[in-house]
Amino acid sequence: MLHCTMITPVILCGGSGTRLWPLSRKSFPKQFVPLIDGKSLLQLTLQRVGALGPQLMVVAAESHRFLVSDALQGIPAGAQAILEPASRNTAAAMALAALQATDNGQPESLLLFCPADQHIPDTAAFARAVKEAVPSAEGGAIVTFGIVPSFPSTAYGYIQHGSLRPDGSLQVQRFIEKPAAPAAQALLLGGAVLWNAGIFLCRASVLLQALERHAPDILATCRKA
Protein backbone atom coordinates (compact mmCIF):
# COMPACT_ATOMS: atom_id res chain seq x y z
CA MET A 1 0.00 0.00 0.00
CA LEU A 2 1.14 3.53 -0.71
CA HIS A 3 1.00 4.71 2.91
CA CYS A 4 3.27 1.83 3.97
CA THR A 5 5.78 2.29 1.18
CA MET A 6 8.57 4.84 1.34
CA ILE A 7 8.45 6.96 -1.79
CA THR A 8 10.98 9.70 -2.45
CA PRO A 9 9.74 12.13 -5.13
CA VAL A 10 12.56 13.35 -7.37
CA ILE A 11 11.86 16.53 -9.33
CA LEU A 12 13.88 16.75 -12.54
CA CYS A 13 14.40 20.47 -12.94
CA GLY A 14 16.52 20.61 -16.08
CA GLY A 15 15.64 22.35 -19.30
CA SER A 16 16.71 25.69 -20.73
CA GLY A 17 13.25 27.15 -21.25
CA THR A 18 14.06 28.55 -24.68
CA ARG A 19 10.80 27.31 -26.24
CA LEU A 20 8.82 29.76 -24.09
CA TRP A 21 11.10 32.69 -24.89
CA PRO A 22 10.92 35.60 -24.11
CA LEU A 23 8.73 34.75 -21.09
CA SER A 24 11.36 32.22 -20.09
CA ARG A 25 15.01 32.07 -21.00
CA LYS A 26 18.15 30.11 -20.21
CA SER A 27 18.71 31.94 -16.93
CA PHE A 28 15.02 31.73 -15.97
CA PRO A 29 13.49 28.56 -17.50
CA LYS A 30 9.75 28.02 -17.73
CA GLN A 31 9.58 25.76 -14.68
CA PHE A 32 10.44 28.81 -12.53
CA VAL A 33 8.06 31.26 -14.22
CA PRO A 34 4.83 31.97 -12.26
CA LEU A 35 2.35 30.79 -14.88
CA ILE A 36 -0.70 29.51 -12.97
CA ASP A 37 -2.34 31.46 -10.15
CA GLY A 38 0.94 33.16 -9.38
CA LYS A 39 2.78 29.87 -8.93
CA SER A 40 5.47 28.30 -11.05
CA LEU A 41 5.23 24.80 -12.50
CA LEU A 42 8.01 23.75 -10.12
CA GLN A 43 6.03 24.99 -7.12
CA LEU A 44 2.91 23.17 -8.33
CA THR A 45 4.93 20.00 -8.87
CA LEU A 46 6.35 20.25 -5.35
CA GLN A 47 2.82 20.56 -3.97
CA ARG A 48 1.58 17.64 -6.06
CA VAL A 49 4.25 15.19 -4.99
CA GLY A 50 4.58 16.42 -1.42
CA ALA A 51 1.75 14.20 -0.22
CA LEU A 52 3.42 11.09 -1.67
CA GLY A 53 6.58 11.14 0.42
CA PRO A 54 7.91 13.04 3.44
CA GLN A 55 11.26 13.63 1.75
CA LEU A 56 12.00 14.77 -1.76
CA MET A 57 14.89 15.65 -4.03
CA VAL A 58 15.27 18.31 -6.71
CA VAL A 59 17.90 17.81 -9.41
CA ALA A 60 18.79 21.10 -11.09
CA ALA A 61 21.63 23.00 -12.70
CA GLU A 62 24.09 24.72 -10.40
CA SER A 63 23.30 27.99 -12.19
CA HIS A 64 19.69 27.74 -10.97
CA ARG A 65 20.51 27.08 -7.32
CA PHE A 66 18.96 30.33 -6.06
CA LEU A 67 15.77 29.76 -8.06
CA VAL A 68 15.50 26.27 -6.60
CA SER A 69 16.14 27.58 -3.10
CA ASP A 70 13.32 30.11 -3.48
CA ALA A 71 10.92 27.43 -4.75
CA LEU A 72 11.74 25.20 -1.78
CA GLN A 73 10.73 27.87 0.73
CA GLY A 74 7.86 26.53 2.79
CA ILE A 75 8.59 22.91 1.88
CA PRO A 76 8.88 20.66 4.97
CA ALA A 77 12.35 19.75 6.17
CA GLY A 78 13.96 16.89 4.32
CA ALA A 79 14.12 18.33 0.81
CA GLN A 80 17.50 17.82 -0.86
CA ALA A 81 18.80 19.81 -3.81
CA ILE A 82 21.23 18.00 -6.11
CA LEU A 83 23.02 20.55 -8.28
CA GLU A 84 24.63 19.55 -11.57
CA PRO A 85 27.72 21.54 -12.66
CA ALA A 86 26.36 21.22 -16.20
CA SER A 87 22.99 19.90 -17.29
CA ARG A 88 23.29 16.61 -19.14
CA ASN A 89 20.45 14.26 -19.91
CA THR A 90 17.58 12.78 -17.95
CA ALA A 91 19.44 9.52 -17.32
CA ALA A 92 22.29 11.37 -15.61
CA ALA A 93 19.90 13.32 -13.39
CA MET A 94 18.10 10.12 -12.42
CA ALA A 95 21.41 8.40 -11.72
CA LEU A 96 22.50 11.20 -9.39
CA ALA A 97 19.27 10.88 -7.42
CA ALA A 98 19.59 7.09 -7.15
CA LEU A 99 23.18 7.43 -5.96
CA GLN A 100 22.09 10.02 -3.39
CA ALA A 101 19.34 7.69 -2.13
CA THR A 102 21.97 4.97 -1.73
CA ASP A 103 24.26 7.36 0.13
CA ASN A 104 21.30 8.19 2.38
CA GLY A 105 21.09 4.51 3.29
CA GLN A 106 17.89 3.97 1.28
CA PRO A 107 18.86 1.90 -1.78
CA GLU A 108 15.54 0.05 -1.77
CA SER A 109 13.35 3.14 -1.48
CA LEU A 110 11.04 3.89 -4.40
CA LEU A 111 12.02 6.96 -6.40
CA LEU A 112 9.27 8.82 -8.23
CA PHE A 113 10.88 10.85 -11.02
CA CYS A 114 8.77 13.79 -12.21
CA PRO A 115 9.62 16.62 -14.63
CA ALA A 116 9.35 20.05 -13.03
CA ASP A 117 7.53 21.66 -15.95
CA GLN A 118 4.28 19.67 -16.08
CA HIS A 119 0.81 20.89 -15.11
CA ILE A 120 -1.44 18.10 -13.79
CA PRO A 121 -4.67 19.65 -12.48
CA ASP A 122 -6.18 16.36 -11.27
CA THR A 123 -3.81 15.68 -8.40
CA ALA A 124 -6.05 12.94 -6.99
CA ALA A 125 -5.86 10.98 -10.25
CA PHE A 126 -2.09 11.41 -10.26
CA ALA A 127 -1.84 10.04 -6.72
CA ARG A 128 -4.03 7.07 -7.66
CA ALA A 129 -1.83 6.28 -10.65
CA VAL A 130 1.26 6.30 -8.45
CA LYS A 131 -0.45 4.06 -5.90
CA GLU A 132 -1.39 1.56 -8.62
CA ALA A 133 2.23 1.49 -9.83
CA VAL A 134 3.75 0.72 -6.43
CA PRO A 135 3.38 -3.11 -6.58
CA SER A 136 5.13 -3.27 -9.96
CA ALA A 137 7.97 -1.06 -8.78
CA GLU A 138 8.32 -3.00 -5.54
CA GLY A 139 8.58 -6.15 -7.65
CA GLY A 140 11.63 -4.81 -9.46
CA ALA A 141 10.12 -3.09 -12.50
CA ILE A 142 10.92 0.37 -13.78
CA VAL A 143 7.43 1.78 -14.21
CA THR A 144 6.74 4.56 -16.70
CA PHE A 145 3.51 6.50 -16.85
CA GLY A 146 1.54 7.17 -20.02
CA ILE A 147 -1.30 9.48 -21.03
CA VAL A 148 -4.13 8.36 -23.28
CA PRO A 149 -3.62 10.47 -26.43
CA SER A 150 -6.49 12.70 -27.53
CA PHE A 151 -5.03 13.69 -30.90
CA PRO A 152 -2.02 12.77 -33.09
CA SER A 153 0.49 15.09 -31.46
CA THR A 154 3.94 15.59 -32.93
CA ALA A 155 5.13 17.34 -29.76
CA TYR A 156 5.14 14.27 -27.51
CA GLY A 157 6.96 10.98 -27.46
CA TYR A 158 4.88 7.80 -27.49
CA ILE A 159 4.93 4.51 -25.61
CA GLN A 160 3.83 1.45 -27.56
CA HIS A 161 2.59 -1.17 -25.14
CA GLY A 162 1.69 -4.83 -25.22
CA SER A 163 -0.55 -6.96 -23.06
CA LEU A 164 -1.28 -6.80 -19.35
CA ARG A 165 1.32 -8.12 -16.95
CA PRO A 166 0.30 -10.25 -13.94
CA ASP A 167 0.63 -7.19 -11.69
CA GLY A 168 -1.90 -5.26 -13.78
CA SER A 169 0.56 -2.99 -15.57
CA LEU A 170 1.13 -2.91 -19.33
CA GLN A 171 4.36 -4.22 -20.81
CA VAL A 172 6.29 -1.56 -22.72
CA GLN A 173 7.27 -2.70 -26.21
CA ARG A 174 9.10 0.40 -27.39
CA PHE A 175 9.47 4.14 -27.00
CA ILE A 176 8.89 6.34 -30.02
CA GLU A 177 10.39 9.82 -30.16
CA LYS A 178 8.29 12.75 -31.36
CA PRO A 179 6.94 11.49 -34.69
CA ALA A 180 6.05 13.37 -37.85
CA ALA A 181 2.34 14.02 -38.40
CA PRO A 182 1.65 11.00 -40.66
CA ALA A 183 3.41 8.66 -38.23
CA ALA A 184 1.53 10.13 -35.26
CA GLN A 185 -1.77 9.57 -37.05
CA ALA A 186 -0.81 5.98 -37.84
CA LEU A 187 0.13 5.36 -34.21
CA LEU A 188 -3.28 6.47 -32.99
CA LEU A 189 -5.09 4.44 -35.63
CA GLY A 190 -3.08 1.37 -34.65
CA GLY A 191 -3.94 1.76 -30.97
CA ALA A 192 -1.90 0.41 -28.05
CA VAL A 193 -0.01 3.68 -27.65
CA LEU A 194 0.21 6.33 -24.94
CA TRP A 195 1.88 9.69 -24.74
CA ASN A 196 5.11 9.42 -22.76
CA ALA A 197 4.69 11.48 -19.57
CA GLY A 198 8.36 11.22 -18.64
CA ILE A 199 7.41 10.06 -15.14
CA PHE A 200 9.03 6.94 -13.66
CA LEU A 201 8.78 4.92 -10.45
CA CYS A 202 11.39 2.37 -9.41
CA ARG A 203 13.72 1.29 -6.64
CA ALA A 204 17.00 3.19 -6.52
CA SER A 205 18.91 -0.11 -6.65
CA VAL A 206 16.97 -1.30 -9.70
CA LEU A 207 17.73 1.89 -11.61
CA LEU A 208 21.44 1.67 -10.79
CA GLN A 209 21.53 -1.95 -11.94
CA ALA A 210 19.84 -0.99 -15.22
CA LEU A 211 22.32 1.84 -15.77
CA GLU A 212 25.20 -0.51 -15.03
CA ARG A 213 23.95 -2.80 -17.81
CA HIS A 214 22.80 -0.29 -20.41
CA ALA A 215 24.63 2.99 -19.73
CA PRO A 216 27.76 2.24 -17.66
CA ASP A 217 29.52 5.36 -18.95
CA ILE A 218 26.78 7.63 -17.59
CA LEU A 219 26.79 5.85 -14.25
CA ALA A 220 30.57 5.98 -13.97
CA THR A 221 30.59 9.72 -14.67
CA CYS A 222 27.88 10.34 -12.08
CA ARG A 223 29.75 8.32 -9.47
CA LYS A 224 32.68 10.71 -9.90
CA ALA A 225 30.52 13.85 -9.63
Image: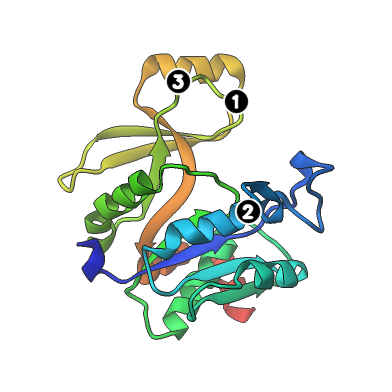
Left or right, 112 with reference to 15: left
Mark identifier at residue 39: 2
Circle 1: element type: loop
Q: What is the distance, in whole Å, between disc 3 and disc 2 at their CAs?
A: 35 Å
Nearest-to-viewer mark from 3 and 1? 1
**For the view shown, which residue lies furthest in the front direction?**
37
Q: Image quadrant of residue 220?
A: bottom right
Label 1 environment density (alpha carbons within 10 Å; few <14, some 14–19, many ≥20): some
Q: Is residue 137 visible?
A: yes
Mark 3–mark 1 CB contact (< 8 Å): no
Q: What is the distance, in whole Å, between disc 2 and disc 1 at their CAs?
A: 28 Å
The residue sitting at 80% across, 44% down in the picture is 23
Residue 147: x %, y % from top left: 42, 35
Colour scheme of the picture? rainbow
**Which amino acid type is marked by label 2?**
Lys
**Which amino acid type is marked by label 1?**
Thr
Nearest-to-viewer mark from 2 and 1? 2
Q: Is residue 214 visible?
A: no
Circle 2: element type: strand
Q: Image quadrant of residue 54?
A: bottom left
Nearest-to-viewer mark from 3 and 2? 2
Mark 3–mark 2 CB contact (< 8 Å): no
Viewer-side residue, 116 vs 136: 116
Q: What is the distance, in whole Å, between disc 3 and disc 1 at their CAs?
A: 11 Å
The residue sitting at 37% across, 68% down in the picture is 53
Which badge, 2 or 1, is on the more N-terminal residue?
2
Mark identifier at residue 154: 1
Viewer-side residue, 136 vs 208: 136
Looking at the rendered image, the quarter that the C terminus falls into is: bottom right
The residue sitting at 60% across, 57% down in the picture is 42
Residue 56: x %, y % from top left: 47, 71
Mark identifier at residue 187: 3
